[in-house]
Image: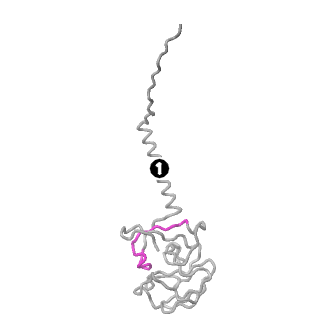
Amino acid sequence: MTDPEVPMTTFATSPPRRSALAAALGWTRDLLLSVILAVLVILFVYQPVKVEGTSMMPSLEDQERIFINKFIYRFGMGDIQRGDMVVFWYPGDPSKSYIKRIIGLPGDSIEINNGTVALNGNMLEETYVPSAYRDTQSVAKTVVPPDHYYVLGDHRSSSNDSRAWGPVHRRHIYGKAVFIYWPLDKMGLIH
């Protein structure tokens, strides 16, 4: 005698439902990882700073908020270039930081005659310095020493810069200004 075949019934199995507690723990873990990642980025790569003063007008204005890239110069990811806006510890008081534009690289010859900058014997075209912000200061010819940079503010008539205290040593430069995030109408990359 043969056993009658019993038809098999298949039931669709649904995936196990996560408990509300497991879902909350998942969200908490993701949020915590996001916060840790944001803190690491701010500490080691980008740092928000507030511009204080008018020495970089019109490029940067007093009380604007910007991001600086601290990673680019620290680990050799990029060389300091002429024209970069850099943030550095003020050589006269390392508790203060300044932001200025790189004008001279190590080995460059800088001379300023009635406000006109000569770089390696050639007049430097500075489209970022409007005529209203120029001054008539003169500085004798100087050669930028190794590992130093000659920095000037864009608002020459109100800037305390290398004309007063000389070139900045490389070890004092800790960031490059890259992005304006406040006010919103000026949001964008810094040139």
Residue 38 x %, y %: 48, 57
Examine the image and state in which quarter residue 155 appears: bottom left
Q: Amino acid at mark 1?
A: Leu
Q: Main secondary structure of the magenta part?
A: loop
Circle 1 crowding by C-alpha within 10 Å: few under 14, some 14–19, many from 20: few
Indicate whether residue 73 is drawn in magenta. no
Q: As displayed, is residue 142 above or below residue 31?
A: below
Q: Residue furthest left?
A: 185
For disc 1, the marked residue is 32
Examine the image and state in which quarter residue 129 appears: bottom left
Segment tinted magenta in the rendering: 52-71
In this view, the residue in front, 134 or 169, is: 134
Colour scheme used in the picture? one colour
In this view, the residue in front, 48 or 127, is: 127
Indicate whether residue 64 is drawn in magenta. yes
Q: As displayed, is residue 60 above or below residue 43?
A: below
Residue 18 x %, y %: 43, 36
Instruction: Please name the residue shown 44% across and 45% down the image.
Output: 27
Residue 79 x %, y %: 58, 72
Q: Residue furthest top?
A: 1
Q: Secondary structure at mark 1?
A: helix
The reply, left or right, for residue 14 in relation to residue 90 is left
Instruction: Please name the residue shown 45% across and 39% down the image.
Output: 22
